Image (tube, grey):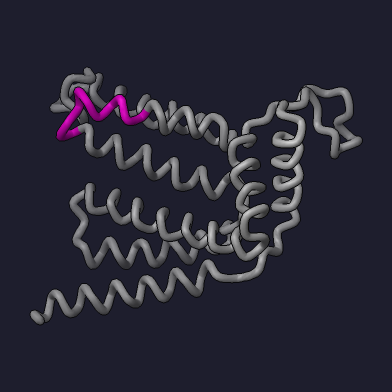
Amino acid sequence: MTTPRLLSLVLGLLVTAHLSLLGFFQISDPDTWWHLKQGELYLTTWSLPADDPFAFTTAGREWVKFSWVADILFYLTFLAAGAPGLVLLRLLLLFLIALVLYRVLRGCDLHPLASVLLVFVASLALRFRLFVRPETLSFLLLLTTMAILLRLQDRPARGVYALLPVQVAWVNVHASFVFGFGLPGLVLLANLLPGAGFAPGWG
């Protein structure tokens, strides 16, 4: 085995071990159980209530349910595998986030080793927000949007349609979906400025 391939293998194993240790801890965030209760409510009533029945301080106020899809996903996972299933789901999301981030960094022509190191640093920062909550899904959707936008430099005509299912999912997962409109807006603005532009055909 050549030295570069051996180094890549060792780095891959180290990153895998690091992410596994980072994401494998018991659920301690109280909001997780609130989201589980919401998911249970949606599935048992087959409806999205107009107000939050679990909060007396907001009684009678309209309740915008940005995260209903995420809540149902968490509740179904809990039904199938209990709390350990939620831990494994969080671990899966962490690996997907790391993978997509690596692809984004490589799409920016960053060296593979530098990309791995940045993924390592980013994972340490994410550790403080690594909860079984809709925002963890939103991190993945944000990076997926960035990855799609980077590919528009090569396939601007077809690639843009990949944003649609991502945005549809994001709107029903977390209120941060507004970034899904903002990022393409920045790409469009870049193409309107003088110069070659970011994605040919947009400007």
- Tell me: residue 42, above or below residue 83: above
Quadrant of the image for the C terminus?
A: top left
- Which residue is situated farthest in the left direction here? 2
Q: Quadrant of residue 80?
A: bottom right
Q: Which residue is at a point 59% across and 44% down the rendered structure image? A: 73
Expressed as whole percent of the image width and height from the top left, the position of residue 84 reads 62, 65
Query: What secondary structure is the stretch in magenta mostly built from?
Result: helix
Q: Quadrant of residue 160?
A: top left
Expressed as whole percent of the image width and height from the top left, the position of residue 172 reads 56, 31
Q: Which residue is at a point 52% across and 46% down the rendered structure image? A: 137
Q: Nearer the viewer, residue 1 or 11?
A: 1
Q: Nearer the viewer, residue 194 or 13?
A: 13
- Tell me: residue 7, above or below residue 35: below
Expressed as whole percent of the image width and height from the top left, the position of residue 132 reads 61, 54
* Left or right: 48 as drawn, with respect to 184: right
Quadrant of the image for the N terminus?
A: bottom left
The magenta segment: 153-163
